[in-house]
Image (cartoon, grey):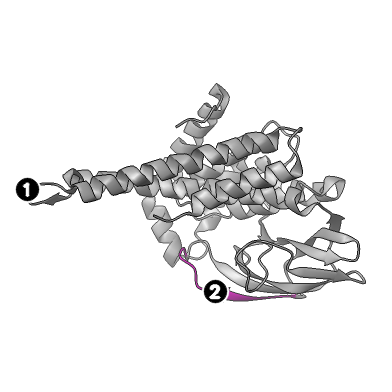
Amino acid sequence: MDVGLTAEQLALRDSVRDILRTECPPDVARQALTDPEYWCTLWKTIVDLGWTELATPGGDFGIVERVVVLEQCGAAIAPVPLLSSVGLAAGVLGACGPAGEGPLTEIAGGVVATLAVHPPGQRLPGVPMTLQSGRLRGRAVAVADVSRAELIVTLAAAGDGVVAAVARNGCGISTQPTDCTDPAQPLADVTIDLEPVIRAPVDLETALAPALLAAAADLVGVASAALARSVEHAKSRQQFGKPIGAFQGVKHALADNYVSVERARSLTYLAAARLDDPSTTAADGWTAAALAKAAAATRH
């Protein structure tokens, strides 16, 4: 279902899909599992195409266009840090005002960034760090692509509220790789103890809503592609002389998952439209993004 997309947005979707079919067929994702540096080639192509410029606020593209691209990358299982950089890190930096312009420009130019906002022992994103006397300290878990990232964006509790902080990967940062379902997009726990290069006060809901939405877009892409492959398998696999898709137990499961994927897609694009609307309050934007993320993450 195309949820109110304009002709330009549909053209963008089709263009991204066609490019990924050429540059990132299934064997590319598989090769990335055995070659840790294979992603660099595809990343250079993505940067040259200008997809990382979606990180820059006030450009030609908004949140909806960002979601369009991230969904297609999710569908292709593209082994690149576009979600981490443009979706997650840039999503929070967009709430930082002028202080975030420098790192956003770096991301737009191809610098890899990631977001560290999951405190240990918590399922939901939050504020894993503290900022005291100019020192950023704390630990975040399940940080994506940190081994590839030059910039780490996080949230910290300061004396006067919550601040977004940016650290450069290196001294003062230690990482511990963790198990993940997609080795081509590695996760790690991160411990930070340093002075951040940038810090800015933010509203927590405003900062996290675009990142939640980006994750939802990626998951919608993954789920829709998995469903399409399942349907093709159900058509071609024979059992008892007929395609397995002819059996109720299979066809009903596929139909239920189709409804779930389309519901998640609709909620995701609705949330994107709301975040693109300047009149949307922080609470409404957060709620819309959280609902989209919850729907996209539901397993059936």
In the figure, is residue 62 to the left or right of 247? right
The label shown at residue 255 is none
For the question of whether residue 275 can be seen, the reply is yes
Which element type, helix, strand or loop, lies under badge 2? strand
Residue that protrudes farthest toward the left in the picture? 241
Main SS, magenta residues: strand
Task: Tell me the amino acid under the disc marked 1.
Answer: Gly
Report the front residue among 29 and 288: 288
Instruction: Residue under label 1, please give it.
Output: 241
What range of the chain is rendered magenta? 173-182
Establish if 24 lies above or below 124: above
Establish if 114 lies above or below 16: below
Instruction: Residue under label 2, please give it.
Output: 178
Count the labels in the image.
2
For the question of whether residue 62 can be seen, the reply is no
Residue 198: x percent and y percent?
84, 58
In the figure, is residue 202 to the left or right of 89? right
Quarter the N terminus occupies: top left
In the figure, is residue 250 to the left or right of 46? left
Residue 57: x percent and y percent?
74, 39
Marks 2 and 1 sit apart, C-alpha to C-alpha, by: 45 Å
